[in-house]
Image: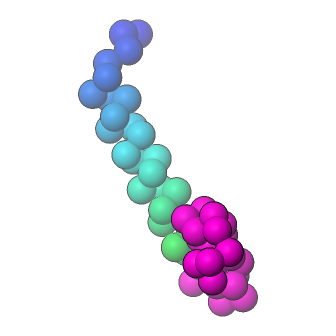
Amino acid sequence: MKNNPVDGVKFQSLMLKIIFFICLWYIFSNPNSIKFWDDFERGLFGLSPATK
């Protein structure tokens, strides 16, 4: 099987979409997880206490 970069990119974007939808479903099915995602986002993008 030849490794085609175009197929790799398609597969990667498909995986990202699937992960994104799973995350959305997880957030909407667990209202309590919003605080977790808030903390997660702050940790991921903020990385500094000043962003609180």
Q: Relative to 38, say whether 4 is above or below.
A: above
Residue at image location 57% in from the left, 84% down from the top: 28
| Residue 35 counted in the magenta span | yes
Q: Relative to 3, say whether 8 is above or below.
A: below
In the picture, measured across the screen, residue 43 lies left or right of residue 18, that is right
Residue at image location 38% in from the left, 15% down from the top: 3
Q: Which sits in the foreground, 37 or 50?
A: 50
Residue at image location 64% in from the left, 68% down from the top: 48
Write the start and end of the magenta stretch as one range: 28-52
The percent position of residue 16, horizontal first and vertical second, equals: 45, 51
The percent position of residue 33, horizontal first and vertical second, equals: 69, 81
Residue 37 visible in the shown view: no
In the picture, measured across the screen, residue 21 lies left or right of residue 42, that is left
Q: Residue furthest left?
A: 6
| Residue 45 counted in the magenta span | yes
In the picture, measured across the screen, residue 5 lies left or right of residue 51, that is left
